[in-house]
Image (cartoon, rainbow, N blue to C red):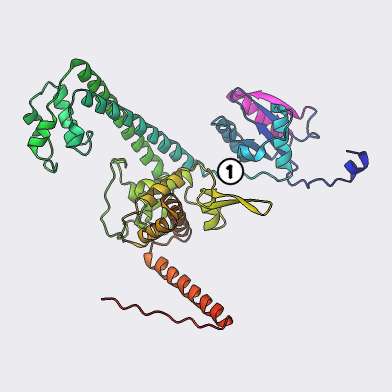
């Protein structure tokens, strides 16, 4: 580029003059500060705690007030927490937003590029809830991992039973229930009489005792009994771990302040069916009551929203949704809004962004459970399924659930299905008035059709 053109080029305005950029790595980090604040504006620090504290002191000497860093795996967490405790304004940035220009790439150029983008205000910080919510989130995600590990041992137990031709899963809904565990313990204790094993079932088991006894006639091999014993021990070990995590989660939830409008007693439910605890919900405390105390509104009244889904919302987002300007922005952050890419006047792609959000996944699962629901959201799901197909219907219903949750948490109002029905009637009325005006402009008249039923 000629020198005259280079001098006449307009530069971007500096919005954050005291900004720094950090390139995160597993063994070392590279920090870049403004060139006029230090003789060596780029420094490398190891990832030991002592070195991270030294990096924070160096940033203070350079007059840095705000720091931007990439969300690289979990390596950013120690530095983020140290800088946040030292009073810096930390921006955790999506790695896709700070991609370097093509060409030579190094850790030094990456941190300088992040520092420049943050200086001119081109970076947006990712959403991160309060520290108390982050602590509960870490425990809840660890609990999910323990449930998955326990499920692995359930599959091992099922494999051992299949190899011995014990068709227990054909007569019981789950082999880890009360009846299933009784039978497994008796088998490992040496009981082989099918009738005696069948008598261990609970009275609520629907299948007859003769059919259960028939399913328990198998080939008891020592090697398969050994694997069954170890798998059952592993399953119970993780169940004990889950109970300990539940107790810690209960202790952490008690430290979260209550909502101002929350009452001591849970309000009356508006769902048609009574509340039933799922087998994956905590049993050591009332999760639904704790969520009502914290949110100030019972989210489980919304069809498709269970206590686990509501707790996922608390862990991933928290109680303060002021970071989102409206419900549309909240649904877009969850990746439940369609994204349209246009080039040359042609639509290249229309679909939701590939966002990995636990809240969005929980809302999709809740939307999928409304297929046979006898309420407004169930009718909406079935209507969208006929119009768009099931995958799109799940996304559309999850999007509506997200907007409902945003409204309930923002206004602290209980769920009322009549508001949604009234809104749909107003939309239909506006559409009918619009058609009448268009027909009148063309010289026609819209006459409503009266349908006679019976």
Q: In the rendering, at what x and y percent does residue 145 appear?
A: 39, 32
**Residue 89 in sight:** no
> Residue placed farthest to the right in the image?
4
Q: Residues within 10 Å of mark 1 (few under 14, many from 20)?
A: few
Say which element carries label 1. Answer: loop
Q: In the rendering, at what x and y percent does residue 90 appear?
A: 62, 40
Q: Quadrant of residue 243?
A: top left
- Which segment is the magenta one? 40-62
Q: In the rendering, at what x and y percent does residue 46 appear?
A: 63, 22
Q: Quadrant of residue 192?
A: top left
Who is closer to the viewer here, 286 or 97?
Answer: 97
Which residue carries the number 1 mark? 126
Seen in the picture, residue 442 relative to 245 is either above or below; the reply is below
Q: In the rendering, at what x and y percent does residue 335 appear?
A: 52, 48
Magenta stretch holds residue 47 = yes
Seen in the picture, residue 317 relative to 426 is either above or below; the reply is above
**Residue 94 in sight:** yes
Q: What residue lies at 13% left-to-right and 43% top-to-bottom?
A: 206
């Amino acid at each position: 580029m000629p020198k005259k053109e280079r001098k006449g080029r307009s530069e971007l305005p500096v919005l954050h003059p005291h900004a720094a950029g950090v390139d995160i790595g597993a063994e070392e980090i590279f920090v870049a500060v403004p060139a006029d604040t230090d003789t060596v504006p780029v420094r490398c620090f190891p990832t030991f705690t002592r070195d991270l504290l030294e990096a924070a002191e160096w940033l203070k000497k350079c007059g840095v007030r705000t720091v931007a860093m990439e969300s690289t795996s979990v390596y950013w967490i120690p530095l983020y927490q140290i800088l946040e405790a030292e009073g810096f304004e930390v921006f955790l940035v999506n790695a896709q937003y700070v991609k370097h220009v093509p060409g030579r790439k190094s850790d030094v150029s990456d941190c300088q590029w992040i520092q420049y983008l943050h200086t001119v205000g081109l970076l947006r910080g990712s959403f991160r809830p309060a520290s108390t919510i982050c602590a509960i989130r870490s425990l809840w995600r660890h609990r999910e991992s323990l449930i998955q590990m326990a499920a692995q041992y359930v599959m091992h137990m099922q494999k051992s039973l299949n190899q011995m031709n014990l068709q227990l899963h054909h007569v019981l809904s789950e082999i880890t229930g009360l009846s299933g565990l009784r039978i497994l313990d008796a088998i490992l204790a040496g009981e082989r009489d099918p009738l005696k094993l069948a008598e261990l079932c609970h009275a609520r088991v629907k299948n007859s005792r003769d059919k259960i006894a028939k399913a328990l006639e198998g080939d008891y091999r020592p090697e398969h009994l050994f694997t069954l014993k170890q798998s059952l021990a592993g399953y119970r070990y993780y169940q004990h771990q889950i109970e300990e995590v539940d107790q810690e989660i209960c202790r952490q939830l008690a430290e979260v302040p209550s909502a101002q409008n929350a009452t001591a007693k849970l309000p009356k439910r508006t769902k048609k069916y009574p509340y039933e605890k799922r087998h994956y919900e905590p049993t050591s405390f009332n999760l639904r009551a704790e969520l009502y105390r914290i949110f100030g509104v019972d989210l489980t009244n919304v069809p498709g929203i269970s206590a686990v889904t509501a707790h996922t919302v608390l862990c991933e987002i928290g109680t303060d949704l002021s970071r989102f300007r409206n419900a549309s922005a909240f649904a877009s952050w969850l990746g439940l809004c369609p994204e349209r890419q246009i080039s040359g006047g042609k639509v290249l792609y229309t679909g939701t962004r590939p966002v990995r959000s636990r809240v969005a996944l929980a809302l999709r699962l809740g939307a999928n459970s409304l297929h046979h629901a006898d309420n407004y959201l169930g009718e909406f799901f079935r209507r969208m399924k006929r119009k768009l197909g099931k995958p799109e219907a799940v996304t559309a219903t999850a999007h509506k659930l997200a907007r409902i949750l945003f409204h309930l948490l923002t206004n602290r109002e209980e769920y009322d299905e009549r508001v949604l029905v009234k809104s749909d009637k107003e939309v239909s009325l506006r559409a009918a008035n619009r058609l009448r005006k268009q027909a009148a402009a063309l010289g026609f008249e819209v006459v409503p059709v009266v349908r006679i039923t019976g």
